[in-house]
Amino acid sequence: MSPQTLLAFVLGYFILLFIVAWYSSRNANNESFFIGNRNSNWKLVAFGMIGTSLSGVTFVSVPGNVGNLSSAGAVPNAFGYFQVVIGYFLGYIAVAFILLPLYYRLNLTSIYNYLDHRFGNWAYKTGASFFILSRTVGATARLYLVVHILHIFILSQMHIPFWVSVLVVLIMILLYTFKGGVKTIVYTDTLQTFLMILGLIVFVWYILSNLHFGIGDAINAMESKKLTQLFNTDVNSKSFFLKHIIGGAFITIGMTGLDQEMMQKNISVRTLGDSQKNMMTFSVIMVIVNLIFLLLGGLLYIYAYNHGATFGTQNGVFGFFHGQLNITGDNLFPSVALGLFEPIPSVMSVIFLIGLISALFPSADGALTALTSSFCIDILGIKKMKDASEQRKKKIRLTVHLCMTLVFFICILIFREINSRSIIDKILELAGYTYGPLLGLFGFGILSRRNLPNTWLIALVAVVSPVLCYLLQIYAPKILGGYQIGIEVLLINGILTFLGLFAISNPSQKPEVYAVSK
């Protein structure tokens, strides 16, 4: 299929999104943008959050990561990512029954207002700033991966520069989130999540049919290539199963429970009970969908083996190759779906493309909206502007929305300079550094009865803790006899932040503020 035809399908997809956005954003105001007027349907939120959490990284990087070599360098990662998914599920339980009751009791628009209630302005601004940093890095990394694929397989063949590809995609996202915000995103995310999951299931069916496999045959073929191992029992490995489960739980608490983008949708639901139903329904579906993505990853590598791919070292790089092209990791799924190995039905290429875009935009549009909301509410204090008219507040919001889009543009260009076979590994690594201080701040507020001085020392602790974690991660193998710190760096970071806050705290307390429930 020609690049022009594929591009036409992409544009048609955007037109559909614009229609949904126009319909859902009628009579929208600032409250619609920030929290959907607290009238969102929990079933739609639960389903749409799947797309927000999975993103284009899951769609491409999780299947590709199955064949990447583990840190030991001897065997593929196989289904090891499912260890993290188990941790995710435990983390969602904590978010549903510890954090959501707190947010609803305080009637928060921004979850970082909790830190203001509990500790004062310095903690509030520090928490919001780390969210803005965290979500900007994570969202632009995800967005880069999908734009890169669209550029390589479609836009570059039309001689369009990469920066133009990025700009066009961002403008499209900007246009359909500009007015409605969360109110629009609840509906567009539902549509996009459906299309993403449909693409996933159709591709599993297609690969099985192409290989003439049943599920049992596929599992046996993957086992023969060591692609099905689930648990890593090497305690010194970064992917040791307890590290992944514990790290995954705290990543969920940090990247979902302490993240304005994810909680913005949850607190847009009318009642706490419905919001908890949303969270638990979403978490079960997430486990199932991730397992299917891992199955697809194993199938894609078997497909590659059966169609001439080789495994070994080529030009100083170790991995899977087809001719001169390294198809390991994030390159694998696009290479299969767009016909590198053998001609593939055009409809399958279109399904892949729509699935990929559908995986991209629920995370990108939600992040852009949440960052705009957090900056307006937490940094600029738009809710406290008593003398400003609704029109004035709207102008501020739209200006911030434009500026955040520009920041996304710059960050994506920076990510293009970072070489990584698997973006998902990079995102989990970065999350450990940026979400750790948030984990420590909220943990100290909820678990302790102490208070903090409203000074710059809070920000200092939040900055120093990730630096100490970075040094510890570098020198841990030498100090701890080969032990490597993996995604548990988030927990370590949170603990260091907690201890630092304890050191500058005093016994003063306001139990009614920090308590999870009355």
Image (tube, grey):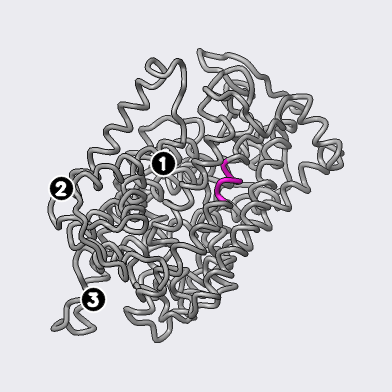
Dot 2, crowdedness within 10 Å: few (<14), some or many (≥20)?
Answer: some
The disc, 3 or 2, on the residue closer to the chain's N-terminal end is 3
**Amino acid type shown at disc 1:** Leu
Residue 231 seen in the current view: yes
Mark 2 element type:
helix
Name the residue type under label 2: Leu
Pointers 3 and 2 in contact (C-beta within 8 Å): no
For the magenta stretch, what is the residue range?
84-88
Magenta span: predominant SS is helix
Q: CA distance from mark 3 to mark 1?
A: 33 Å
- 176 relative position to 351: left or right: left
Can you tell which mark lies on residue 60? none
Quadrant where the C terminus sits is: bottom left
Q: Residue at x 46, y 78 (%)?
A: 22
Q: Is residue 465 left or right of residue 251?
A: left
Q: Residue furthest front?
A: 507
Residue marked by disc 1: 491
Q: Residue at x 86, y 42 (%)?
A: 214
Please give the residue where the numbered disc 2 appears in the rendered image. 457
Q: Position of residue 405 (x, y in %)?
A: 31, 57
Whether residues under marks 3 and 1 lie with C-beta atoms below 8 angstroms apart, the answer is no
Foreground residue among 222 and 439: 439
Per the model, the C-alpha gap separating discs 3 and 2 is 26 Å
Crowd around label 3: few <14 · some 14–19 · many ≥20 (10 Å): few
Q: Which residue is mark 3?
A: 383
Identified by mark 3, the residue type is Lys
Q: Percent x, y for residue 439?
A: 36, 50
Q: Which numbered disc, 3 or 2, marks the residue closer to the eye? A: 2
Residue 377 lies in the magenta stretch:
no
